Image (cartoon, rainbow, N blue to C red):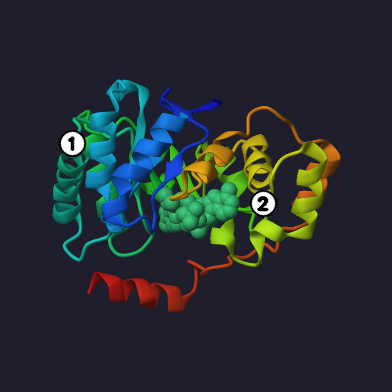
């Protein structure tokens, strides 16, 4: 396993396991499978409705809690700060743990400054080992850093070969914020797993498209958290530390960047309206 070091010194495994869209009743089994394969970093969120399954898998794994890196994310609430603060304690209960390794502000919507303040306080109280944000593009990321007390340690944003965040990354680097990818396979959109460029490169290394896609991000210093409900795919996605892409292949993959989201643009009025609807 390779690690990144956050600006407060906490070490984070560069490869983790995501559980978005993993049904609550399947989550414990999936996370147990992932831990058995060797994953030691799990990414969940209040909004995924499956923190209990993650907590149960960690508890029954027999692995020391300190050897597992747990991330969750605070949703945005109409009540702002008070609700955000209470929700951190609820996540701790659902995850059945005394501390969470990394807690993120899930979306740059609603009163996210208050949400972030609740995270800062929980961090200072020792309930969270690190704090950060998700889906923050440079405008909001820079502004948050200018007007809060603790610089976020991580920014988790949509990142895959079709949307590489080449414009946003310099801002994260300047601020000392680790770039974490969500959707490293673009959830399979655009025939991801049969992309001819990636397939050609994968064949040369005796690897799969999924492995090349993850390796490319890892070599750019990005943290990746692929999701799968299939144990053989979890194992495939974990097996990415025994090869290195050549500079020429990385240059070829860099050209797949379309510079925009395959899902939704967090900076449009339509997206803000859609998210405001979730909070109502
Ligand atoms: P993803 O990891 O890009 O793709 C998951 C999809 O790929 C699933 O349909 C999975 O199918 C399939 N898959 C996985 N490994 C495969 C392989 N080796 N070969 C073929 N198919 C494979 O998508 P994601 O779940 O959206 O992103 C990963 C994690 O990022 C999430 O689980 C979540 O933790 C996080 N996330 C965060 C946000 C945010 O707003 N912060 C948003 C989205 C996601 P099966 O499950 O059927 O195997």
Q: Nearer the viewer, residue 2 or 115?
A: 2
Q: Quadrant of residue 120?
A: top left
**Image check: 78 left or right of 158?**
left
Residue 271 lies in quadrant: bottom left
Residue at the right extreme, as displayed: 248
> Toward the viewer: 81 or 227?
227
The numbered disc on residue 166 is 2
In percent of width and height, residue 249 lies at 82, 43
Residue 49 in view of the camera: yes
**124 and 130: which is toward the camera:** 130
Q: Residue at x 47, y 38 (%)?
A: 16
Is disc 2's CB within 8 Å of ligand 1? Answer: no
Q: CA distance from mark 2 to mark 1?
A: 38 Å
- The residue labelled by disc 1 is 96
- Observer-nearest residue: 49 or 138? 49
| Residue neighbourhood size for the residue with mark 2, other residues' Cα within 10 Å, grouped as few (<14), some (14–19), many (≥20) | few
Does ligand 1 reach within 8 Å of label 1's beta carbon? Answer: no
Q: Nearer the viewer, mark 2 or mark 1?
A: 1
Classify the position of the C terminus by image quarter: bottom left
Q: Residue at x 62, y 43 (%)?
A: 214
The answer to whether 137 is drawn above or below residue 266 in the figure is: above
Q: Position of residue 166 (x, y in %)?
A: 67, 51
């Amino acid at each position: 396993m390779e690690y990144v070091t956050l600006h407060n010194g906490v070490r984070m495994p560069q490869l983790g396991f995501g559980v978005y869209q993993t049904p609550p009743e399947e989550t414990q089994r999936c996370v147990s499978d992932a831990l058995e394969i060797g994953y030691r970093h799990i990414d969940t969120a209040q909004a995924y409705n499956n923190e209990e399954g993650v907590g149960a898998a960690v508890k029954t794994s027999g692995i020391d809690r300190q050897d597992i890196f747990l991330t969750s994310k605070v949703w945005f609430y109409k009540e702002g700060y008070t609700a955000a603060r209470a929700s951190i304690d609820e996540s701790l209960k659902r995850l059945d743990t005394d501390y969470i390794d990394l807690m993120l502000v899930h979306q740059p919507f609603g009163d996210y400054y208050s949400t972030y303040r609740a995270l800062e306080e929980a961090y200072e109280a020792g309930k969270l080992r690190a704090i950060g944000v998700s889906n923050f593009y440079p405008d909001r990321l820079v502004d948050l850093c200018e007007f809060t007390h603790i610089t976020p340690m991580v920014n988790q944003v949509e990142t895959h070969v079709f949307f590489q965040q080449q414009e946003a990354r310099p801002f994260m680097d300047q601020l000392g914020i680790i770039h974490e990818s969500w959707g490293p396979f673009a959830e399979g959109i655009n025939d991801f797993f049969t992309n001819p460029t990636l397939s050609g490169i994968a064949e040369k290394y005796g690897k799969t498209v999924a492995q090349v896609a993850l390796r490319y991000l890892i070599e750019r210093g990005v943290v990746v958290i692929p999701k799968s409900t299939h144990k053989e795919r979890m194992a495939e996605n974990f097996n990415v530390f025994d090869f290195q892409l050549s500079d020429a292949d990385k240059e070829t993959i860099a050209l797949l960047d379309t510079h925009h989201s395959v899902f939704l643009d967090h900076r449009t009025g339509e997206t803000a309206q859609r998210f405001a609807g979730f909070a109502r």
